[in-house]
Image: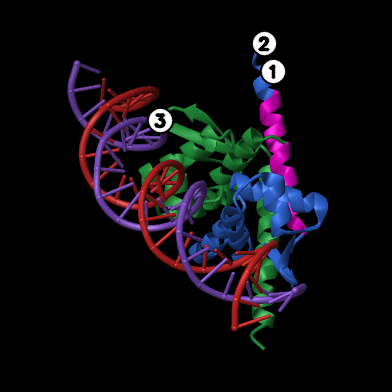
Chain colours: A blue, B green, C red, D purple
DNA sequence: ATAGAATATAAATATATTATAATATTAGAA
DNA sequence: TTCTAATATTATAATATATTTATATTCTAT
């Protein structure tokens, strides 16, 4: 794999390694498709902040949006995203488990 | 999952979403365990730069190191890392494939 | 046309991350 | 002990990212 491709690769990962964007993705994982207002209300964040994070994910091709009247609905484009999130959480779990054991 | 945990979650992901760190992980995936000198020679990067990236991965608990004389050997701690890398590459592949189709 | 609701964008500031270069540490050999 | 090789650390300057606030756009209904 070329340097150039490692950059694409990193940019893709970078797009969802932010706490808020992970929260958005987890929300979409559970609910399938949501409008912006639902997301920022649920996460108790500013509308503009959420819009900007959605843009990052959309620009990176991770999310698809659909307009319906005033509302814009977002959903995850690739199911592999969820596999990535799950594996990451598995590692996190193992790490926390280890920290726990080491308290003895 | 709490806000606090989404931060841990993001930090974990953040640790490997940098082109150089991805190159290091891919290298370790193929070779299993490597010393620092091998890594920076193979990637044609500065020793100190590679050391710093290795530190990021080690601090995040992704890598384990082992000292043998002057050399320090690194390896990946969780096999889930490779699953994450593979899934990410699958998405990248699909995206490039799409871009390709859209050229028509 | 105008008003209002949902979303997007822009600009400014603050914060985080990176690469480079210089220096420090550590271990083995002479 | 002193020299050298391998690695780590530190400081700094450059770059990238994030949050906030304000404003703009888009759509619908009146």
Looking at the image, which residue is at 76% across and 53% down? A28
Q: Main secondary structure of the magenta part?
A: helix
Tell me if residue B76 can be seen. Answer: no
Residue sticking out furthest to the right? A31
Q: Is residue A86 magenta?
A: yes
Locate the C terminus of chain A by quadrant.
top right
Give me the C-alpha separation between circle 2 and circle 3: 33 Å
C12 relative position to A4: left or right: left
Q: Quadrant of residue A36?
A: bottom right
Q: Quadrant of residue A70?
A: bottom right
Count numbered badges in the picture: 3
Q: Is residue A22 above or below residue A10?
A: above
Looking at the image, which residue is at 71% across and 39% down? A89
Front one among B9 and B69:
B9
Where is mark 2, residue-wise? A104
Residue sticking out furthest to the bottom? B104
The percent position of residue A20, horizontal first and vertical second, equals: 62, 47
Front one among A38 and B57:
A38
Q: Is residue A41 above or below residue B35?
A: below
Where is mark 1, residue-wise? A101
Q: Give the structural element (helix, strand or loop) at label 2.
A: loop
Same chain under badges 1 and 2? The reply is yes
Magenta stretch bounds: A79-97
| Callouts 2 and 3 close, C-beta under 8 Å | no
| Callouts 1 and 2 close, C-beta under 8 Å | yes
Q: Is residue B78 above or below residue A25?
A: above
Where is mark 3, residue-wise? B70
The answer for which chain carries disc 2 is A
The percent position of residue B22, horizontal first and vertical second, equals: 55, 51
The percent position of residue A68, horizontal first and vertical second, equals: 76, 71
């Amino acid at each position: 794999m070329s340097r150039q491709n490692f950059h694409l690769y990193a940019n893709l990962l970078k797009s969802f390694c932010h706490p808020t964007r992970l929260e958005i993705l987890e929300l979409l994982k559970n609910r399938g498709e949501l409008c912006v207002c639902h997301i920022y209300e649920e996460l108790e964040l500013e509308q503009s902040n959420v819009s900007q994070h959605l843009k990052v994910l959309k620009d990176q091709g991770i999310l698809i949006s659909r307009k319906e009247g005033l509302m814009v609905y977002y959903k995850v484009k690739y199911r592999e995203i969820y596999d990535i999130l799950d594996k990451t959480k598995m590692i996190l779990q193992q790490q926390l488990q280890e920290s726990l054991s080491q308290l003895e």
